[in-house]
Amino acid sequence: MEDIILLSHGSGGEQTRKLIEEEILKYLGNEILEELLDSGIFNIEGRLAFTTDSFVISPIFFNGGDIGKLSIYGTINDLSVMGARPLYLSVGFIIEEGLTLNEFRRILQSMSFASRECGVKVITGDTKVVERGKGDKIFVNTSGIGVIERDLDWRGRKIEEGDLIIINGGIGEHGLSLMLQRLGVKVGEEVKSDLAPLNSLTLPLLSLCHGIKFMRDPTRGGVAGVLNEIARKYNVEIEIEEEKIPIKDWVKYASEVLGIDPLYSANEGKVVIIVERGEADKVMEFLSKHELGKEGRIIGEVKGKGNRVYLKTRIGTKRILDPLKKDLLPRIC
């Protein structure tokens, strides 16, 4: 019988010790975490950014990633779009009794790869085990701390008429690929989540272009959701052009079959950027040379005051992109 997670792995006793030392530290260990204190102690200077997120995705393994890699990249991206260099993470596992140790190891391996790739350390954490039927295999919470260096903090820069809207690549891929997988639809290798860490893109870009006024990764609610947040927060009218939005062919086909507008579908490797018109070419040149920005496009602009988002269609008409009224795809991240 394959080894599985038992309630005793969360009891605080010998099984808990073995799970931490033989599994978690094996993949995530470092000089701070290995002290196994109630808090990870570290030194840091500068303006800090702190974020937290919980990941309840279904399925936990999907085309393009898994819940482990998603939990690391997702938190890193939340820091990176704010101009913060990610440094340290905490990880909390809530595991349902019956998860196999092989599945848990796969998740830990992904987290180890992702954290090393991005130059961050997991320095504290927690593990709880709940009874069968009280969870869904595994939930993960990650919190992250980063430092905002130099003048990378874009907050306080005024969004004005004429500013341009940029996306670094094709939209809707994460949400639609997961839905196809849930439905058991057989697809090609190109159909996968866009899951990726954004720190290697956003931080150099913010250092290069001081006309960037806003950044956000469009996860739940998609690009339309982020644009509506911007419109409400800054009391501006935004217009995007349908023919300029980068969308892969398989996303178009899947969205038509499933009845899901890709503008509202989740992304996990994209960033919406607002930049003053005079620096847009500089942003686009940078994106064209970056692996995560080769498909980047200018998709619209700020039209002035108005608290509304419009889509200019291919035939020249306009339709309002309202905020999402309900969750299109639950358990998407």
Image (tube, rainbow, N blue to C red):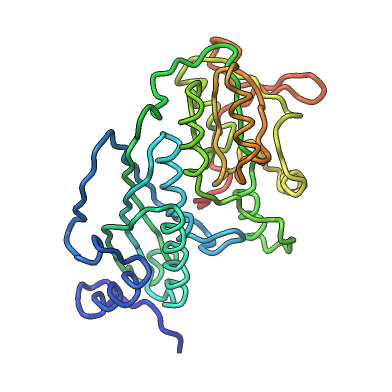
Relative to 91, say whether 105 is above or below: below
Relative to 296, say whether 8 is above or below: below
Looking at the rendered image, the quarter that the N terminus falls into is bottom left
Taking the image as shown, residue 110 lies to the left or right of residue 170, namely: left
Taking the image as shown, residue 311 lies to the left or right of residue 277, namely: right
Taking the image as shown, residue 11 lies to the left or right of residue 54, namely: left
Task: Please tell me in which quadrant of the rendered image residue 51 appears.
Answer: top left
Res 204 visible = yes
Please name whichever residue, 276 or 299, is drawn nearer the observer in this view of the structure: 276
Taking the image as shown, residue 29 lies to the left or right of residue 298, namely: left
Q: Residue at the location (73% across, 44% down)? A: 248
**Horizontal and vertical percent for residue 292?**
60, 44
**Horizontal and vertical percent for residue 205?**
51, 33
Relative to 211, say whether 305 is above or below: above
**Horizontal and vertical percent for residue 126?**
27, 62
Q: Residue furthest bottom?
A: 1
Count of marks placed on residues: 0
Task: Please tell me in which quadrant of the rendered image residue 298 appears.
Answer: top right
Q: Residue at the location (64% across, 20% down)? A: 239
Q: Residue at the location (61% across, 53% down)? A: 193
Res 220 visible = no
Please name whichever residue, 251 or 282, is drawn nearer the observer in this view of the structure: 282
Q: Residue at the location (41% across, 57% down)? A: 115
**Horizontal and vertical percent for residue 11?**
23, 73
Task: Please tell me in which quadrant of the rendered image residue 287 appears.
Answer: top right
Relative to 327, say whether 8 is above or below: below
